[in-house]
Each structure stands twice: as C-alpha cells, then as structure tokens.
Image (spheres, grey):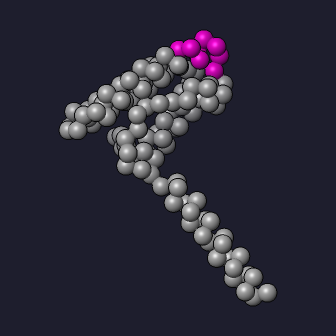
Amino acid sequence: MKRFGLTLMAALCLSATAFAAGNQPTTEKWEGYINVSKLSKYLQLSSDQMEEVANICNYFNAQMTEANRLKDERQTKMLHNAIHGNLQLMKKTLTAKQYARYAKVLDITLKNKGIEME
C-alpha cells in the first residue's frame, strides 16, 4: 500500500510539473493573430461590432507582423504603436465593459508572450 501511495504521488508531481512547464511565458514575439470568433463570444459582440473588430484585428495582425520583422529599437516603437493603436480603435468600437474585458485579455496575452508595455 505504501508503494502504491508513493507511485501515485510521483505520478501526480510529474503531471503537475509538466502542466506548469507548458504555461511559462515565452520569449518568442507574438504575431498579433486574434481569434475573432472566440473574442466575439467572450465579449458578446453585436454583428456590427463583430465586423469592425475583425477589421481591427486584421490591421493589428499586419502591424505586429511588420514590427516583429525589425531587430532594433524601431521594433519596440512599432510594437508600442501597434498595441496602443489597437486599443484606441477598440475603445471606439466596444462598450466600456467590453473594452475593459478586452484590455485585460490583451494585457495578459502580451505578458505571456514576453512583451512588456509601460
């Protein structure tokens, strides 16, 4: 019985370690792709908002892809401009409650990808 308990505990620790290792922030840069379908469900967007958000997300993706091609201080400036531009466009499109939820999700996503914004 003691051996079974130790085996069970070892398996539990191993699975917990593997799960935690997969949730660590990465240093790879984020291309800017946003799943509009999942985002629209999360924010409960209207059909008009969904179309506008899809356009904003496509524009944001293009800006982030371009910024990630650079390798110097211009990259930081372009990332900053892309993110703040995205937030400004979303603020005009979404309600205050939706925008607050979107800003939280974007902030967490950026931190998980290792992109720090002031």
Q: Is residue 59 above or below residue 115?
A: above
Residue 65: tell me if it is visible.
yes
Residue 6 position, x and y percent, is 69, 82
Residue 4 position, x and y percent, is 75, 82
Secondary structure mostly taken by the magenta-highlighted segment of the chain: helix
Q: Quadrant of the C terminus?
A: top left
Residue 80: tell me if it is visible.
no
**Image quadrant in which you'd find residue 11:** bottom right
User: At x 52% / y 55%, what residue is drawn?
Assistant: 22
**Image quadrant in which you'd find residue 3:** bottom right
Q: Nearer the viewer, residue 7 or 44?
A: 7
User: At x 40% / y 34%, what residue is drawn?
Assistant: 31
| Left or right: 12 as drawn, with respect to 61 | right
User: At x 71% / y 76%, what residue is drawn?
Assistant: 8
Q: Residue furthest right?
A: 1
Decide whether residue 43 is among the magenta residues. Answer: no
Which residues make up the magenta segment?
Answer: 45-52
User: At x 60% / y 70%, what residue is drawn?
Assistant: 14
| Left or right: 35 as drawn, with respect to 28 | right
Residue 38 position, x and y percent, is 62, 30
Q: Quadrant of the N terminus?
A: bottom right
